[in-house]
Image (cartoon, helix red, strand yellow):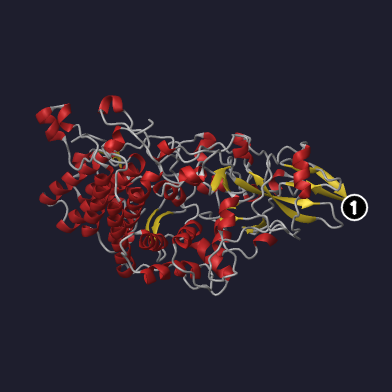
Amino acid sequence: MKKNILSIFSLCALMGLSGCNAFLELEPLDKVSPDQLLETEGGVKALLANIYTMIPMEDFNYRPNAGFNQRGYDGVNETTNLAFLTDEATRSDGGVDIGYEGFNYWPYGDIRQVNIFMQNVEKAKEAGTISVADADRMTGEAHFARAYMYYGLVKRYGGVPLIDKVQDDDYADGGPGAVAVPRSTELDTWKFVLNECTLAAATLPDATSGSDLYRVTKWAAYALKSRVALHAASVAKYWNLAPLAGEAVTQKLVGGMTSADADAFYKECIEASKFLIENSGKSLYKPAPATVKEAASNFQALFLNDQNEEIIFSKAYLNGTTNTNQGHSYAQFNILPQVNPGALKYGRFNPMLEIVDLFEDYTDDGTGKSAKIVTRTDGNEDAYIANFHNMNNASVVNTLMSVPFVKYNDLYEPFANKDARLLASVVVPGSSYAGTEIIIQGGFIKDNNSYVAYSNESTQKNGTTYYALGAEGETMFSGFNNVNSGEDANWTATGFGVRKYMPEGESMSPDRLSSTTSYIDMRLAEVYLNYAEAVVENGSGFGDKELAENCLNALRRRAGHTDRISLTLESVLKERRVEMTFEGKRFWDMNRRREFHTEFSNNRIRKALVPMLDLRGAEPKYVFARVNYFGDETRGGRTFQNINYYRGIPNIATNGLVQNPGH
């Protein structure tokens, strides 16, 4: 066995965040070898905890440009979120590429550790160190981790080498050539992952508690299977919408799947999802609010309490300022300036206007149609101002002055009747956060038909001083200051901040890695949406359409809607986007459905909403300018290339694997 040295302090912290005393009784207390760990039950659990740290969960410490478990300081890059690679949000300085991660995920060292662990669990069971029941459970957990790792591989690379055993004996018999494993087809790789989920579910418990609280259950395995099967089905159905060519395509290492394969995967998603829905005992968190305000409060609270009845699998954290390899900085990086307790980099998570516009209001006429923010009296909400930052350009000035703006009395008025899930996920202009009115204003229009934007100039009218960004001091407003200025871009550049997962109302430290809000990896709402999509998308009539429609409308009822919408692909995909906003789903949804290259084509420029104070009338009023997002406009827009649906296989010079197209 490879003599890795493991830190018990970091391992036991993961195992439910408590009950670590047994681990610490090992000698020496801080570091021990795997051989020593196998001598006690607590030691075997410590090895298991190490496996948990390898699960490629795209949580608060995942950085698309760097990888998993990234806690080291890396300037503004450290603040990057998967949502920033989509049309959901952007980083305040704008410097994030679209649709493509910037690191190689090639975890065969981790997979080897899982395979070794499975082997050692059998040894520990035979030696009587652990019970048969504990051994079965740990083996199930190892299958879950291995499924997650291979899912992380197949969704990035297509077919990959499948290694499900320790290769030491093979190497001893035949040298390096005996352990060289070629890539499997993409189809077979997806099947392997799903089988790993099945094996995991077979021996995992229904529930956990106490010091085992954050260990996986049978239902986490079913939820993962639901997610994986839907992903596989979508790729099988849509992969040829983004044609590629080359040896990997010819060998079906990427793509090459049929409609029959798609339906088989949809069926697996339907069966896994339905079994979980009907047997897990899980239910939506607070599914029947009395008011829209209550619905918004409930939805916000859902993400701050990971022990509610909806949660299937989550990850907890200790304070990283006092515990090594713990904590995260989500709150510190994303808190808005007006309520910042002293964090050095803040206000970084900027939702795009596109996602805000996607949410409904409460017309509730049974159509489920989105309701864009009303900014114009002529209803032309698809008109956007280009080069808005260029205040001295006559054409831009004339365009702005000609807009028939709806004029509002305050910043919040345009958002007052929007879906509760929007108000629980996004900090909109004029809303309250921790008892503070959030001032997001990007400029003003003067009496002389000129304007100021993205700069906090002041002007006077009738003896009153007005500031372009809404207040005099930089700590008194939250938008459009230092736009596009890298390390100093701590104000929203899109008109919005993030609320989902933000610990509003809690005492917050300014220190990096001090956040302890749990990350929710799997919840029942996702399974509902997986089921509904699989029922709509399969071509063989699999699934219960009434149940799928009920799942869809249960989520809407939880958000305060009173109508019932029909089960259509359009309604399912829209509900998925608004329900799962900022939860890492949009990136992979566009990937699996092969929508990235059409959503981001021809140098797409995402959109922002700039609230402005209009001083042209007798009384100042607020108007809202729909503009091209400055961060995209100055970079010439964003385009997704087909080759990025599959990433380049790393180290092909030494591993001899077939490379993916275009890499």
| Left or right of residue 162, residue 327 in this image | right
Q: Amino acid at mark 1?
A: Asn
Q: Residues within 10 Å of mark 1 (few under 14, many from 20)?
A: few
| Left or right of residue 604, residue 455 in this image | right
| Residue 427 image offset from top left, x and y in percent | 60, 55
| Residue found at x 39% / y 48% | 592
| Residue found at x 56% / y 71% | 365
Task: Report the front residue among 240 and 385.
Answer: 240
Up/down of 426 relative to 255, above or below: below
| Left or right of residue 32, residue 638 in this image | right
Task: Report the front residue among 130 and 148.
Answer: 148
| Left or right of residue 343, residue 645 in this image | left
View extreme (top): residue: 653
- SS for tag 1? loop
Q: Please say whether residue 456 is visible from this viewpoint.
A: no
For mark 1, what is the residue?
A: 462
| Residue 558 image offset from top left, x and y in percent | 49, 69
Which quadrant of the structure image shows residue 526? bottom left
| Residue found at x 49% / y 69% | 565
Q: Please say whether residue 248 is visible from this viewpoint.
A: yes
Task: Report the front residue among 301 and 562.
Answer: 562
| Residue 46 image offset from top left, x and y in percent | 27, 47
Task: Report the front residue among 375 and 68.
Answer: 375
